[in-house]
Amino acid sequence: MARKRYTPEQIIGMLREAEVRLSQGEKIGSIARLLGISEQSYYRWRREYGGLKTSQAKRLKDPEKENQRLRKAVSDLTLDALILKEVVEGKY
C-alpha cells in the first residue's frame, strides 16, 4: 500500500476531529480507521502535534528547513576543504 504524506495542517485537523470523537466515546481504533491512518500514526502525531495550532505547526517546520540548508552548506564546505587538502598534499 502506498504511503500518503499529510501536511501539518491536515494532521492537526485530523487530531482535532479525533479529539471530538474521543469525547463522544468512540474508541481510538475506530477513529483511526475512519481517518484512514494507523493507531501508531495517531499516537505519533499526537505526541508531535498535540495541542498545536496550525500557525504554530508552520513555525515548527521553518527551523527544520533552515537546519537542512545549513547542514548542506557545511557538508559542501567540508568536501571542498578535503579536496583542497588532497591537492596540496599532491595525492591526485
Image: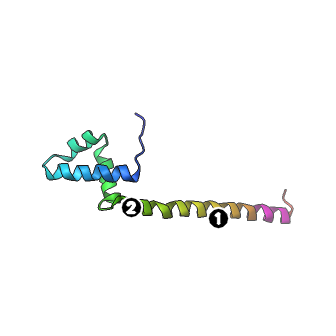
Asked if the residue under mark 2 is in contact with the one under mark 1, i.e. CB atoms within 8 Å, the reply is: no
Residue 65, x across and y down, in percent: 53, 59
Between label 1 and label 2, give the one nearer the viewer.
2
> Residue at 22% across / 53% down in the picture?
19
Q: How crowded is mark 1: few (under 14 residues within 10 Å), some or many (20 or more)?
A: few
Residue 25 horizontal side relative to residue 16, left or right? left
Left or right position of 73 against 26 = right
| Quarter containing the N terminus | top left
Mark 2 surroundings: few (<14), some (14-19) or many (≥20) residues within 10 A = few
- Label 2: which secondary element: helix
Residue drawn at the location 37% of the way across and 53% of the way down: 9
Q: Residue 92 vs residue 68: left or right?
A: right
Stretch of the chain drawn in magenta: 82-89
Find residue 25 and report its horizontal and vertical position in percent. 12, 49
- Seen in the picture, residue 54 relative to 36 is either above or below; the reply is below
Residue holding disc 1:
74
Q: Main secondary structure of the magenta part?
A: helix
Q: Does the magenta stretch include residue 85?
A: yes
Q: Disc 2 marks which amino acid?
A: Ser
Q: Tell which circle, 1 or 2, labels the residue nearer the N-terminal end.
A: 2
Q: Which residue is drawn at 31% across and 51% down?
A: 13
State which quadrant residue 92 falls in: bottom right
Query: Residue 21: x and y, percent?
Result: 18, 48
Point 28% across, 52% down: residue: 15
* Helix, strand or loop under label 1: helix
Q: Taking 2 as reference, is 53 left or right?
A: left
Disc 1 to disc 2, how far (Cα)?
30 Å
Q: Tell me the tag on residue 7.
A: none
Residue 5 part of the magenta-drawn span: no
Write down the residue under mark 2.
55
